[in-house]
Every structure is written in C-alpha cells, then in structure tokens.
C-alpha cells in the first residue's frame, strides 16, 4: 500500500493534488492545523511538514510499526511541526477533537476502516466550520455491473477481498472493501453531515477519485 501511495500521492501531492482545493496552498504557507487519517508511514505528512513549516501536521494510523517509522523520519529531518499517533478511530465520531483542524486528508484510507461511517462523522466533528476534507479513494461504482469495463477491475476486487475487507472485518467492522464505490462514498459523506462534495479525477491517477469536501458552502 505504501508503494502505491508513493506513486499516486507523494510524487504529485504538492504540485497536483493539493491545488485541487482552492486556496489551501496559501493557507498551508501561512500556517494552519492539518490532520491526516490513516497516514501509514507518514510520507504525505512529512512531505507537507517540510514544504509548509508554518503549519502543524498530525498523522493517525492503527499500525504501531508505521507510526514508529513516520516519527523516526520526522525526527531525522527535524520536522518539529509533524506529530504522529497510533490510534484506533473506531470511536472517532465521539472522541474526535471539536472543530480543531482547518484541513483534513485521507489518502486511500477510509474504506479500510473498521467503521468508516464513524470515522467520517469524526472528521466532520474535528473540522472547523470553514475547513476542507480532501479524501482520495478508489475510482469505481458501488454496483458491479458498472465496473465490468474498469481497466483495473479484476485487480481491485481481488485486493478488496484479500486485503481491504479483511482489514476491516478483523476489527469487527463493516468490510466495505476497495470497491465501495462513488455512490456509497457520497451516501456516507452525506450521512456524516457533509453536503458540499466535489468529485475530481486526475490524469496521472486513473485508479482514484479525489473528493473535495466542505462542512459549509463557500
């Protein structure tokens, strides 16, 4: 998963992905609070922390090994504005900080969660009223018949059953899997209290959608 993220996210994060959110580059440069959900080995957090020293970055992940590695890299590079925590987000809907973050990101992470519904509700709780949530997740439909011509369909359904669903079900979770799809994603975002959602695609990444999500309309 880290290798895949490196190809689709890390290499294009600053120049291509972040500019999908109008004004966020300027805000990051000035200094804001940022949270990355499911940060893994911390590649995105550490890169943003290096590029935007005036902002503060927090990364959450369930894997102690990944968090240890991310923290080590931050320390080696003297990134005092990057902080990582091993955290199970199953109850994030009730224990997320209230209106703390200006910008929250999740790169190919929400569908893996035990309770993605609670995680999304927690994101809404943690985001400031004028904040933005940027969610990268698999480009596909919630309906199998719409994915018959998907160029990576067989691979994605295999990854879903062999990894993503297993990760979630092992936590007693919902087991959405990789191909939860755009329709289900929009439904769950709406249920979490998000009503302003813009779904974007990028030329370099046919495998993912990028959801730009606001708590309130601009």
Image (spheres, rainbow, N blue to C red):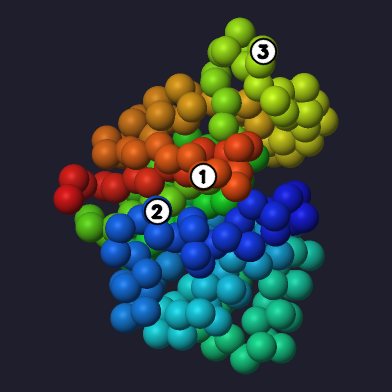
Question: How far apart are the two marked residues, 3 and 1, measured between alpha carbons?
Answer: 21 Å
Q: Where in the figure is residue 187, as x and y percent of width and height?
A: 40, 25
Query: Which residue has dot 3 on it?
Result: 148
Q: Nearer the viewer, residue 61 or 16?
A: 16
Question: How far apart are the two marked residues, 2 and 1, measured between alpha carbons?
Answer: 9 Å
Query: Which residue has dot 1 on it?
Result: 202
Contact (Cβ within 8 Å) of mark 2 with mark 1: yes
Q: Where in the figure is residue 208, as x and y percent of width and height?
A: 58, 39
Query: Which residue has dot 2 on it?
Result: 20
Q: Nearer the viewer, residue 10 or 71?
A: 10
Helix, strand or loop for disc 2: helix
Residue at horizontal 74%, vertical 72%? Answer: 68
- Compared with residue 148, is residue 98 higher up or lower down, i.e. above or below? below
Residue at horizontal 30%, vertical 58%? Answer: 22
Residue at horizontal 49%, vertical 27%? Answer: 182
- Compared with residue 34, is residue 54 higher up or lower down, i.e. above or below? below
Q: How many marks?
A: 3
């Amino acid at each position: 998963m880290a290798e895949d993220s490196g190809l689709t996210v890390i290499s294009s994060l600053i120049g291509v992905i972040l500019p999908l959110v109008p004004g966020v580059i300027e805000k990051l440069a000035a200094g804001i609070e940022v949270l990355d959900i499911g940060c893994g080995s911390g590649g995105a957090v550490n890169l943003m922390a290096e590029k935007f020293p005036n902002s503060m970055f927090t990364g959450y992940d369930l894997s102690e090994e990944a968090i240890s590695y991310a923290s080590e890299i931050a320390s080696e590079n003297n990134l005092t504005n990057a902080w990582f925590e091993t955290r199970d987000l199953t109850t994030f809907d009730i224990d997320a900080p209230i209106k703390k973050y200006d910008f929250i990101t999740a790169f190919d992470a929400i569908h893996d969660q035990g309770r993605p519904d609670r995680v999304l509700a927690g994101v809404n709780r943690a985001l400031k009223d004028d904040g933005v949530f940027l969610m990268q997740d698999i480009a596909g439909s919630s309906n199998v018949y719409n994915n018959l011509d998907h160029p990576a369909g067989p691979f994605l359904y295999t990854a879903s059953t062999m990894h993503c669903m297993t990760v979630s079900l092992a936590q007693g979770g919902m087991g959405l899997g990789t191909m939860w799809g755009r329709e289900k994603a929009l439904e769950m975002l709406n249920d979490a209290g998000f009503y302003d959602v813009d779904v974007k695609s990028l030329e370099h990444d046919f495998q993912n959608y990028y959801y730009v999500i606001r708590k309130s309309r601009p």
